[in-house]
Amino acid sequence: MSKSIFITGATGFVGAAMVRHFAALGHPVLATSRSTAPSRLLDVAQYHRADLTRPLAPISAEVVVHAAALASDAAAWTDLARANLDGTRHVYEATRNSPCFVYISSSSVYDPRRAMHTEDEPIETSLLSPYGRSKYLAEQWLLEQDWTGRSLYILRPRAIYGPGDRVLLPRLMRLVRGGRIVSPGSMAVQSSLTHVGNLCQAVTACEQHHQPGTWIFNVADAQPYAMNAVVHRLLSDIYGQPLDFLPLPLGPLRAVARVLYTLGLARQFTPQSLAAVSADSMLNTQKIREMMDFEPHFDFWNSTGEIANWAKTVGIERVKNADSDLCWSC
């Protein structure tokens, strides 16, 4: 039976994928973002333009997918708090009558010193990046609300990838210089990744499960990956030739990243972005597999061709610069 779905962040990578996913399943979709809606979005969903940092009018939907967020390691705390905390409160208030609320959180809420993460591990907010702290505090605020007769699902993906990605993929593509991958260290680390299709699949599992209460689930592909193998395969496919690595020593890079971050000059090169490709970070997904009968359909090795073709079709330079309408170009 089709259910009405309200999706925030609909012009972003994840939100756009959610809109396409649920529309394809035959659900009536109401989408929102603060940007003007691309025509292809209007072909599959109703659209309401809104700034989530301000209160919203009441919204009627059976399922809420709150995917909107300011995902930046370099943003000021005031901006992160307005987008990720105030925005979450406003979405919650506007959808108080919705039976099912799905919050797309992040693995950035976890202790970066740990290699393997489970949903019930202790979290010390002082160790988190400002972005990770904003997502964790939004989680905690939601958990404190009244869910009597309603359900809250908090999903924690890691490094979401796929066609339309304008966060992870552009960062990796900017590593290519002079036909080589200028990498932070050897990148010989193990990491979980989350194909956006697997995240959509997890949201569908939540919508179908829908039992009153609160749940937190890690969401990732079936197995972690060796990051050096992933980066080499993906970038070689995109650029159409095998690319050699030129590893740079991690010690000086970490020192520079810390200085830039402290001075407020960091943009893409932050301690958090450096750690993402230089330290093991894996998600234990046993909980969602057992409770929700969740088995990821998508795998990186079977997706590289699609991602590379999308990047080449859209334009390599355009993807590297992460144009705002990329997610509706695929």
Image: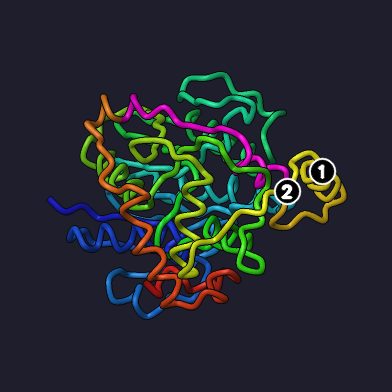
Q: In this view, does 243 lie to the left or right of 248?
A: left
Of 315 and 231, the residue lying toward us:
231
Residue pictured at 44% horizontal, 53% vertical: 161
Q: Residues within 10 Å of mark 2 (few under 14, many from 20)?
A: few
Q: Where is residue 312 in the image (x, y as percent from the top left)?
A: 44, 75
Determine which residue is flagged by label 1: 252
- Could you say which is closer to the camera, residue 307 or residue 14? 307
When the figure is inspected, residue 288 is found, relative to residue 74, above or below; the finding is above
Q: Which amino acid does label 2 sit on?
A: Leu
**In the image, which residues are magenta?**
271-288
Whether 280 is among the magenta residues is yes
The front one of 175 and 204 is 175
Q: How far apart are marks 2 and 1 (CA)?
A: 9 Å
The colouring scheme, among rainbow, by chain, secondary structure or one colour, is: rainbow
Residue 229, above or below 327: above
Q: In the picture, which quadrant includes the C terminus?
A: bottom left
